[in-house]
Image (spheres, grey):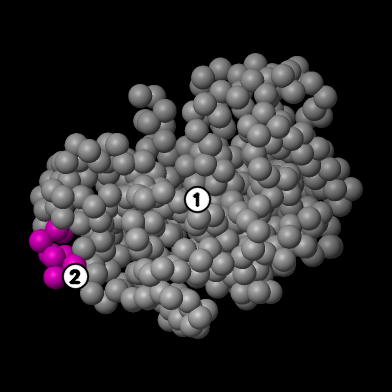
Amino acid sequence: MNQTQLADYNLVRNSVGLFDFSSSTKIYISGKESLSLLNGLISGNVEAMNDGKIINSLLMRNDGSLLAIVWVLKDEEQYIILTDAEKRKTLLEWILNQAKEFNVQIEDKTDILGSMGVVGPKGQDLLMAVAGDDIIGLPYLGFEHNTLINCLICRIGYSGEYEYRLIFPKERYDELQDQIMEKGCECGIALCNIDILDTLMFEMKLVNQNKDLLDGTTPIQAGLHWMINFRKSEFMGKDAMMKEKQLPSKKLLLLLSEDKIDIPNQAKLFIEDLECGFVVKNTFSPTLNKDIFLAYIDNRFAWVGIHFDIETIHQEKGLVKTVSGPLFITKTLSEAASQ
Amino acid sequence: MIMERDTLEIALQKGLERQEVTERLKKVLIERLMLPLEADEICEDSPLFGLGLGLDSVDALEIVVGVEQEFGVSITDEDMQAFRSINTVVDFIVGRPWRKGVTQI
């Protein structure tokens, strides 16, 4: 982690940072059969959603392989799908293809809407100063059409801190950024690089769909069970999920090392001479002051508390141990609990 | 924390012991909270509150009572900070003295 990344990390974990999410995907779906379409494509329970609510869910192919992880907003007669910029083309093509027989209208508003994120333990106070005191009542996985600053404000995210996503016509970006930076001046707010969010979600044991899910990895192996409504009668990929959930071949776990370890790409894990898994991602956690790893591990050994030898770039193997996620309680949660 | 290498035998044993506590905890949650879930539909690292299982503060009290009764542990308000996922609750349980039917892992 370089100095700039560390500064962004400390800002978001201790105060508040601003992120430009304008390139993130924003697809609007409306029309008579929008619920039918989405309920068949998305693994979560779209039917039970009330206005102003958000779910975090998956789209899968019939074979159970993952297409995209999405946030779905129910906004009266329309649904808004938010996901990473990298998934835009794949997701849009998929939805358009599946929607051919449905009476729906699909609009990709990615290029006409701007978006920014306010993230950190001081995020709620800052947003109240910008968008009004009612922000305090906005629950996690809720959104509102804010009339004070005239934009959509969603409370979503994976960092474990207060995380608000603002969505608005693109031409208003500078105006809104100026307002937020001015009100956030005392907190030391700064524009942060979006890459640091990967470390923040890593610490919360939440999966980055662009980095942590190798080709062929299933949502069950990645631990995304909670994004799936297993009781829903039908959705794409359901049969594959129901078969696999009983005995996944491998699971994704967090590991720690006590020492600094330099590892190769997809470093292997061993117990004695048995290869048991491999690392998909590693980074340094400033909060824990340790290196952390994310690895797929053979189901028999995919439990917290087990030590593994890990391949290094040197002759000797290093030693790591599986640990529970999330790795710690964030400042946001800790302060909320004490109120 | 001093790390020592596990043998295959020890690793398998640790896994089985952890699995046993985990399955008991999941059963407590499913029954007490009447969750429409089977045990293999709950990932051990899924958040309990907010994202994940989406439980609330009322559910939290039920979890406390259920864990105290099932495992014979005593839980304070401060201990509740540990209750972030199935795995962190299991960490709490196996780390307590005088727990019912739980081997120290």
Residue shown at 27% from the left, 36% from the top: A136
Q: Can residue A6 be seen here? A: no
What subunit carries mark 1?
A: A
Q: Which residue is mark 2?
A: A170
- The answer to whether marks 2 and 1 sit on the same chain is yes
Q: Residue at x 74, y 23 (%)?
A: B71
User: Which of the chains bears the disc numbered 2?
Assistant: A
Q: Residue furthest right?
A: B9
- The residue closer to the viewer here, B33 or A106, is A106
Q: Per the image, is A180 magenta?
A: no
Tell me the residue at 38%/63% (across/down): A79
Q: Position of residue A258 (x, y in %)?
A: 60, 47
- The disc placed on residue A48 is 1
Query: Type of residue at label 2?
Result: Lys
Magenta region, main secondary structure: helix
Amino acid of disc 1: Ala
Residue A272: percent from the left, percent from the top? 83, 57
Looking at the image, residue B78 sits to the left or right of residue A314; the answer is: left
Q: Calculate the distance from the C-alpha at mark 2 to the C-alpha at mark 1.
A: 31 Å
Quarter occupied by the C terminus of chain A: top left
Q: Secondary structure at mark 2?
A: helix
SS under mark 1: loop
In the displayed structure, B53 sits above or below A334; it is below
Seen from the viewer's position, the closer of residues B60 and A207 is B60
Q: Which residues are magenta?
A: A169-177
Q: Identify the mark nearer the N-term, 2 or 1.
A: 1
**Residue located 63% across and 56% down the image:** A232
